[in-house]
Amino acid sequence: MKIVLASGNAGKLREFSQLFDSHFAAQHITLVAQGELGVSDAEETGLSFVENAIIKARHAAAITGLPALADDSGLEVDALQGQPGIYSARFASMNNAGNGDNDNNSLLLQRLVDVPAAQRTARFQCVLVYMRHATDPTPQVFQGSWEGSILTRPSGSNGFGYDPLFYLPAEQCAAADLDKGRKNALSHRGQAIQQLLQRWQP
């Protein structure tokens, strides 16, 4: 059985492949990146993580004819009223402040420059959606949250996105300081994957 992963994000592809392969390899279920099947990124016009994940899964399933798995994830910062949220990957570009992870992180630090440590609470959110086909009337939805706070400068060289700024009090380090195994066990994406493993109905 092949499932198309509706994402063009290289970091997400690596994480999903590691998590997926470790659980489903014996069942002959393989995850194929949408790019390998000629699928372009869907236009994310939803107003929530759930809506965007469904849009992406439906788009990939419609083009490939395969079941599709999509995630929409992002960082919610309390002092910024939940921003960047669903716009996490486009935070800098939407504010004419550059493009990519480094510019996103720089803009986040600028927005929080006068915010004290106690008010820098934040969380990563991940919503996974599995659709058996493009017109699936009951998409399966799995959601994970990862609580932390925002540092004043980056730390660590692992991970991607906002990981270097996302501090985990229980681990006493940034997400980018964790090794892959530990991150997968703790992260919002790892939590959503665990829900999928427990409840998924192919």
Image (cartoon, rainbow, N blue to C red):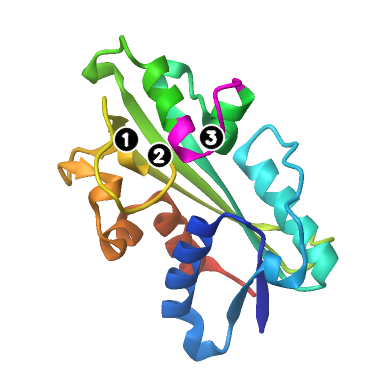
Residue 148 is drawn in which quadrant?
top left
Mark found first going from the N terminus, 2 or 3: 3
Residue 165 numbered mark, or none:
1
Q: CA distance from mark 2 to mark 3?
A: 9 Å
Q: Secondary structure at mark 1?
A: helix
Classify mark 1: residues with Cα within 10 Å, few (<14), some (14-19) or many (20+).
Answer: many
Q: Which residue is mark 2?
A: 162
Q: Earlier in the sequence, mark 1 or mark 3?
A: 3
**SS state under label 3:** helix
Residue 169 at what x, y percent from top left? 19, 38
Task: Look at the numbered disc 2 and give the secondary structure of its residue.
Answer: loop
**x%, y% of residue 123?**
39, 35
Label 3 sits on residue: 88
Q: Nearer the viewer, residue 100 or 55?
A: 100
Give the CA separation, mark 2 to mark 1: 6 Å
Dots 2, 1 in contact, CB < 8 A: yes
Left or right of 104: which side holds 134? right
Residue 179: percent from left, percent from top: 25, 60
Q: Point out the image quarter for the N terminus.
A: bottom right
Q: Residues within 10 Å of mark 3 (few under 14, many from 20)?
A: many
| Above or below, comparing residue 93 to residue 100 in the picture | above
